[in-house]
Image: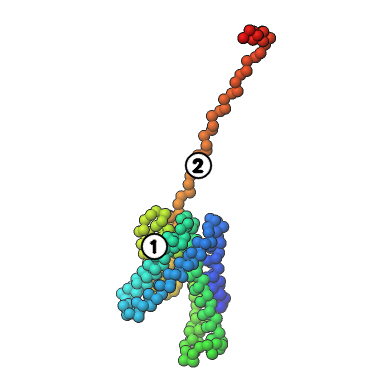
Amino acid sequence: MHYLLFAASVILMLAMPLALATWLARRFRTNWGHFGVGVATFVASQILHIPFNNWVDTRGWLPDASAGVRELLIVAAFLGLSAGVFEESFRYLSFRFWARDARRWEDGLMVGAGHGGIESILLGLNLAVQIVLLAGARAGYFRSLIPAEQWELVQQQADQIFSGPALMALLPGVERALAIVLHLSLSVLVLQCFVRGQRRWWLFAVLWHALANAVALVTLALVNAYAAEAALAVIVLFSLLIIRRLRPEPAPPAPPAADSAAPEPPPVRPEVTGDKLDDSRYL
């Protein structure tokens, strides 16, 4: 059962972004190029985001998150703000330079689908590799690929994963589905910087991104994975509200054109009689 559920999670993580983008393209006639911009935006942000987090960690500026609730909150706030600043800054740059024609609400959704979609695809591929390796190690395979001193640890990890609650195997797919909706709302928020000409919408996106990440991390650490997904689901409900509220109202139908003036009647030609023909001889 675990294997089937993990396979379902992987399929969801790989298929959801493409299915969403296909639906957006057909429903709203959005440009697949905007999906590609979202993909490039996420990848570019991680090139700086991940090294920055590692650099801060190696400097010892962050407390031990396991030391207490206060320390956990500090770490969660840092990680949330770090993700928000890097990803939303690159999202802003994408609309500013790489997707200058993406100004419709639908275009913002397509960029968000690419941003959150490539993250889902990369994590899905990573999950697939991990599950294959752990399942093989549990069966006694791949011993030559794993250092001898780590072999027992890997087998313990595999037993723990495949012997735990089966529903845990579905959580990666559920989490990515929720995260993609969050990214849709974040892209629509940043798009308002250009639609409304107000940069404060970038700040709103940063704070919303940071809050979502921090809430999920704190809930996971203090409760469990199920509670973390439930908390993220609440965030996503508000994300759906953001998406709906920022959708522009459809333009009212144009009033029917005023009826043109009735054409003038043709001039009445006088009736020509024999008497009048006689009179005309003297003109």
In the rendering, at what x and y percent does residue 101 appear?
47, 56
- Tell me the amino acid under the disc marked 1: Ala
Q: Residues within 10 Å of mark 1 (few under 14, many from 20)?
A: many
Nearer to me, 36 or 123: 36
Nearer to me, 142 or 258: 258
| Residue ID at (48%, 62%) | 111
Nearer to me, 218 or 279: 279
* Picture layout, residue 249 above or below residue 60: above
Farthest residue, direction bottom: 148
Q: What is the C-alpha distance between the residues marked 2 and 1? A: 35 Å
Q: Which numbered circle lies on residue 162?
A: none
**Which of the image's four quarters has the N terminus?**
bottom right
| Residue ID at (47%, 60%) | 99
In the rendering, at what x and y percent does residue 185 appear?
44, 61
**Which of the image's four quarters has the C terminus?**
top right
| Residue ID at (36%, 58%) | 199
Q: Are the residues at dot 2 and dot 1 in contact (C-beta closer than 8 Å)?
A: no
Q: Determine the image quadrant of residue 139.
A: bottom right
State the colouring used for the structure image: rainbow
Nearer to me, 215 or 246: 246
Q: Which numbered circle lies on residue 254?
A: 2
- Tell me the amino acid under the disc marked 2: Ala
Q: Is residue 193 visible?
A: yes
Label 1: state its secondary structure: helix
Q: Is residue 127 left or right of residue 74?
A: right
* Picture layout, residue 255 above or below residue 173: above
Instruction: Say which residue label 1 marks.
Output: 205
